[in-house]
Image (cartoon, helix red, strand yellow):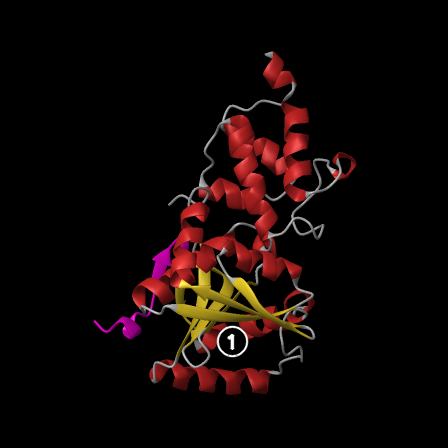
Amino acid sequence: MNNRELQEINTYKLKLRPVNESDLELLRKWRNSPKIRKNMLSQSIISTAEQKKWFQKISTQQKNQQAFHFVVEYKDKPIGYANFNYENRQTGLYIGEEKYRGTILAFCLALALLDFVFLQLCETELDAIVLSRNLAAIRFNEKLGYQIVSDKLDIITMHLTKERYLQAKQELEKIIRI
Amino acid sequence: MSQSETNNPQRLMKVFSQSLAISESQINDDLEYNSIQQWDSTAHMALVAQLEAEFNIMLDIDDIIDMSSVGKCKEILKKYNVEF
């Protein structure tokens, strides 16, 4: 099997599955919630029409294997979203379900996604763009091995190598034992 | 109740205070994650590491995820024979 064909990930207590059309309203609700939207680079409210357009775009990306977009499930219920984009070598993730925001589950998701990128897709480097005021995301990324490479205006660029990730993963797995 | 069990509430208070970097006066059973800026995913990770070290236990991942408040944390620790 081509590594890029992998469609579902089951690990760290989570299931990551491709986004379906039936997920769109839930994803839109999460994405438009103030707590999530305030940390996005683009903070506009997403309309139903824009969400449908986005789904068409990601469907093409997934078909052409340019990107992966996942709904994240915990105990068979959707709790968040994650993606990896080949074009900019960036991942994105959030826990949308309020009950689980601010828990260790975000690290479970990061480990599942980064294992997929580094170990299944065999990528060797990733970048992350974070708003400089989003201290929680910066701390979170640093725990995963990311390092800050530039800090311009209100945007911070972070970089992660596979080696640094594997070191960080070893530490995290002392707590997240599966 | 042993001396160490008598001290468990104080030990728990110290763990929360240190791992979330908040004062002990802010800590009560109703304190929930996400209710204060300091209790985020990274702090939750630090909290679990300190709880395991302080009480010499290994928490199940589902219990960790379920640890949504100080009160809930006490409930879960009881499963690991940490009495309050």
Q: For residue A116, what is the image quadrant?
A: bottom left
Disc count in the image? 1
Residue position for label 1: A24
Above or below residue B62? Residue B52 is above
Q: For residue A130, what is the image quadrant?
A: bottom right
- Residue at the front extreme of this rendering: A149
Side of A150 where B30 appears, left or right? right
What residue sits 45% from the left and 67% below the top? A71
Q: What amino acid is labelled 1 in the image? A: Leu
Q: Chain of mark 1?
A: A
Above or below residue B55? Residue A49 is below
Side of A139 where A166 appears, left or right? left
The image shows residue B16 at horizontal and vertical percentages of 65, 37
The verdict on residue A6 being magenta is yes
- Residue at the top extreme of this rendering: B2
The image shows residue A40 at horizontal and vertical percentages of 62, 73
Quadrant the C terminus of chain A occupies: top left
Quadrant the N terminus of chain A occupies: bottom left
The image shows residue A154 at horizontal and vertical percentages of 69, 73
Along the viewing direction, whichever of A52 and B42 lies nearer the viewer: B42
Side of B20 where A175 appears, left or right? left
- Residue at the right extreme of this rendering: B25
What residue sits 63% from the left and 58% below the top? A136
* Residue B76 appears in the figure: no
Write the start and end of the magenta stretch as one range.
A1-15
- Secondary structure beneath disc 1? helix
